[in-house]
């Protein structure tokens, strides 16, 4: 991901270009074997089909597919993959408040009324990275995203800062109860911006279903079609797909229009005195 000997770009500059904290460069995660990475990919694909599978059911499924695995191994691998089953990454930070779910029965009918954020993992040829995305709930537009090789809160807060700077604060932000989203850095940024905080019920991935559908589309239409070697390749590939998703990919829930087009059309409808803005 980072090239320490690059004569033109310092380590700090490379981290800034990749939108990752500089501290991430010095983090050295333990590598996974090729077999474990293959199992993680298969777990990921199956989780998209059956997100209700727990460790035991996933272990049985993999055994039925011919893999000699035990629950201990699958529990560890699933703990590395914060997409549906989140036994480790969805634990709230100790001492931090859990907020109620505010979207039940709420009619979401305009841009910036509700945003949602979530984290997924990106399989690489020799490891994996983490991706956070912030989405407008009404139009499904991806407002900001970041890639990191750690699950610290910094890269999530960076994405949040970008989204607020570019589009203004929403009324409500909805996330799961993961430590990144219960951290002081995240919740304090929301409170200072006057944003109401909403969190999914424990184990209820459907509470944030629109972001989960984004992950499904991203995985099948982009991630699984490549075997990225570096973080730069992953960032370029994800960035290209997200631009396609926002600007060109027809969305069934939006009458066949792309999310970015609907976002600005709806935003201008709710702010008639404002001049039409470009699609971003």
Image: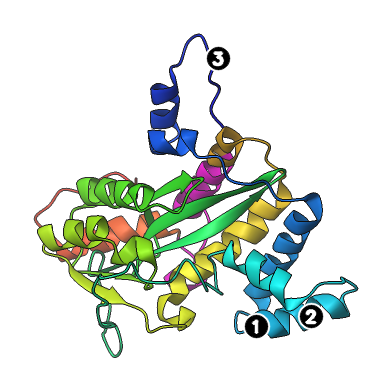
| SS for dot 3 | loop
> Does 81 lie within the magenta span?
no
Residue at which label 3 appears: 5
Looking at the rendering, the stretch of residues picked out in magenta corresponds to 237-257
Q: Quadrant of the N terminus?
A: top right
Tag 1 residue: 53
Which badge, 2 or 3, is on the more N-terminal residue? 3
- Residue appearing at x 22%, y 72% in the figure: 197
**In x, y percent, where is residue 270?**
17, 65
Between tags 1 and 3, which lies in front? Answer: 3
Mark 3 residue crowding within 10 angstroms, few (<14) / some (14–19) / many (20+) = few
Residue at position x 60%, y 79% in the image: 51
What residue is rendered at 72% in x and 50% in y? 225
Q: CA distance from mark 1 to mark 3?
A: 45 Å
State the SS at label 2: helix
Distance CA(mark 2)–CA(mark 3):
45 Å
Q: Is residue 279 or residue 101 the one in the foreground?
A: 101
């Amino acid at each position: 991901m980072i090239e320490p000997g690059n004569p033109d770009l310092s380590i700090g500059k490379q981290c800034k270009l990749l939108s990752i904290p500089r501290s991430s460069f010095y983090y050295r995660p333990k590598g996974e074997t090729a077999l474990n990475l293959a199992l993680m990919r298969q777990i990921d694909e199956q989780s998209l089909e059956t997100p209700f599978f727990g460790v035991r059911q996933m272990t049985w499924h993999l055994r039925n597919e011919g893999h000699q695995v035990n629950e201990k191994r699958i529990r560890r691998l699933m703990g590395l993959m914060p997409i549906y089953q989140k036994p480790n990454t969805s634990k709230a930070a100790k001492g931090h408040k859990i907020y109620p779910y505010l979207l039940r029965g709420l009619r979401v009918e305009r841009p910036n009324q509700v945003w949602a954020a979530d984290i997924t993992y990106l399989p690489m040829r020799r490891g994996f990275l983490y991706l956070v995305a912030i989405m407008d709930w009404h139009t499904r537009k991806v407002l900001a995203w970041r890639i990191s090789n750690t699950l610290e809160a910094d890269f999530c807060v960076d994405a949040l800062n970008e989204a607020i700077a570019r589009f203004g604060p929403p009324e409500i932000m909805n996330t799961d109860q993961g430590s990144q989203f219960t951290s002081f850095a995240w919740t304090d940024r929301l409170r200072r911006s006057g944003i109401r905080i909403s969190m999914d019920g424990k184990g209820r991935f459907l509470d944030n279903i629109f972001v989960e559908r984004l992950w499904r589309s991203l995985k099948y239409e982009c991630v699984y079609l490549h075997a990225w070697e570096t973080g730069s390749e992953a960032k370029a590939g994800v960035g290209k797909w997200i631009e396609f998703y926002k600007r060109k990919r027809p969305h069934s829930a939006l009458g066949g229009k792309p999310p970015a087009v609907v976002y600005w059309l709806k935003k201008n409808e709710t702010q008639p005195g404002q001049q039409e803005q470009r699609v971003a």
